[in-house]
Amino acid sequence: MKLSFIDGDTYVFMDQESFEQFELAKEDLGDNAGYLSPDDDFEMEITFYESKPVGVVLPILVQRTITYCEPGIKGDTSGKSFKPATLDTGIEVQVPLFCDIGTKIMLDTRDGSFAERVK
């Protein structure tokens, strides 16, 4: 299924074969909500319990865009230094100092960690 749209705190998913829609509350998605945007083009699995959707299984890596972060200090490349960054979905993650506003990154959805910069 794919995320079709977000209506307040309700996430609406559509089955790509039957075009049937399923709604999940943001609280049911938990931390996974921070990785989802209607602009995404990836498919995911929806977990059902007694014919009712209860959660999603995301891909391991998802692409997000940095919308805000402080500039890195030039020349500070010793070791693995990170800084906080806000993403297009509103969540905050730690990214390497070389990342700036507008940088597209891949995140590991298992732990929310930075995986790589998208070229």
Image (spheres, rainbow, N blue to C red):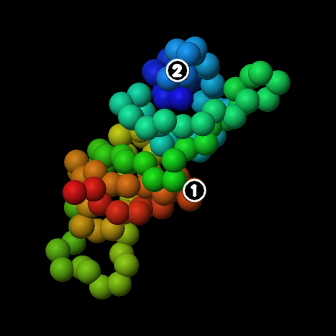
Residue drawn at point x = 41 percent, y = 28 percent: 38
- What residue would you read off at disc 2? 17
Foreground: 13 or 77?
13
Position of residue 9 measured from the top left corner of the image (x, y, whole percent): 56, 23
Tell me, yes or no, if residue 100 can be seen here. Answer: no
Query: In the figure, residue 29 lies in which quadrant?
Result: top right
- Dot placed on the residue nearer the N-terminal end, 2 or 1: 2
The residue drawn where x is 79% and y is 29% is 49
Q: Are marks 2 and 1 in contact (CB under 8 Å)?
A: no
Residue 21, placed above or below residue 47:
above
Please, is residue 86 above or below residue 9 in the view?
A: below
- Side of 46 where 96 appears, left or right: left
- Left or right position of 107 against 109: left
User: Of helix, strand and loop, which one carries label 2?
Assistant: loop
**What is the three-letter code of the residue carrying label 1?**
Arg
* Residue 106 against residue 54 in the figure, above or below: below
Q: Measuring from the top left, give residue 50's x and y in whole percent.
A: 82, 24
In this view, the residue farthest toward the left is: 74
Can you tell which quarter of the image residue 56 is in?
A: top right
Indicate left or right for 58 with 30 as reference: left
Label at residue 84: none
In the image, farthest residue toward the bottom: 78
**The quarter of the displayed image where residue 115 is located:** bottom left
Measuring 63% from the left and 25% from the top, which residue is drawn there? 24
Spatial separation of the CA atoms under disc 2 and disc 1: 27 Å
**Which mark, by number, is residue 110?**
1
Mark 2 surroundings within 10 Å by alpha-carbon count, few (fewer than 14), some (14 through 19), many (20 or more): few
Which mark lies nearer to you, 2 or 1? 2
Mark 2 residue type:
Glu
On the question of residue 28 being in view, the answer is: yes
